[in-house]
Amino acid sequence: MTGEDELEELDADALHDSELLPTRRPHPVIVAASLTARAGLLWLPVAGALALCGKKKAAKRAFTAAVVAMPLGHLVSQFVHRRRPSAANMPARQALPEHPDSSSFPSKHAVTAAAFGTAAALTDGETAFFVMPLVLLVAYSRLRTRVHWPTDVLGGLTIGALVALAQAGIGRSARARATAWRLAAMVRPVFSDHS
């Protein structure tokens, strides 16, 4: 059995009817989370709410991370061709009006959600209490409605978090360069006066 076969077997076992992932129709909140997060739309009002609460920097960085992460998720799915779970007859799957036929890996909902949530939390730790439950709800909604395999969602969360971490690293290095330029501007006259 290959690694890919083992992964598929693990995914299939995880999607069997259980208390965590029942086959019955999900709660309307779960369906709403999945629908409103489509194309990253959920994160626009969330960013607006953060900005109105005085967290403008976190809102800006989180939304930027989400905007960068979404096309990256679509790009990855162009190279990783994976079929979606065959659950068309399940009430859980029928709860969503959408019937995506694109590659299942990664979950673009999870990529965008994780990028937004991680960037917000890295910028302002307090926002994590508000944003991360939404991130987890969106990720769970993709499993609960049987649109993705568990590893699709985990992969999406990982990619999104990495985008936010990269953004934070780029921001830090840009701030470090700006600080170095300011220090150089302050020190230059001292040395030029003594030459």
Image (cartoon, rainbow, N blue to C red):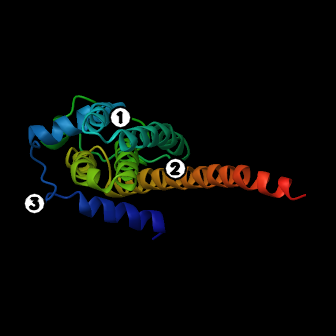
| Residue visible at 46% across and 63% down in the picture | 4
Under mark 1, the amino acid is Gly
Tell me, for residue 167, which label it has, or none: 2
Q: Earlier in the sequence, mark 2 or mark 1?
A: 1
Q: Earlier in the sequence, mark 1 or mark 3?
A: 3
Picture coordinates of residue 120 (x, y %)? 36, 48
Picture coordinates of residue 26 (x, y %)? 11, 43
Q: Residue furthest right?
A: 195
| Residue visible at 36% across and 38% down in the picture | 56
Q: Is residue 183 visible?
A: yes
In this rendered view, identify the residue nearer to me: 184 or 47. Answer: 184
Under mark 3, the amino acid is Glu
Q: Residue furthest bottom?
A: 1
In this rendered view, identify the residue nearer to me: 44 or 7. Answer: 44
In the image, taking residue 43 as reference, residue 88 lies left or right, namely left
Q: CA distance from mark 3 to mark 2?
A: 37 Å
Labels 1 & 3 near each other (Cβ < 8 A) = no
Per the image, the residue denoted by label 1 is: 40
Q: Residue furthest front?
A: 193
Q: Where is 50 relative to 148, above or below?
A: above
Few, some or many residues within 10 Å of mark 2 (<14, 14–19, 20+): some
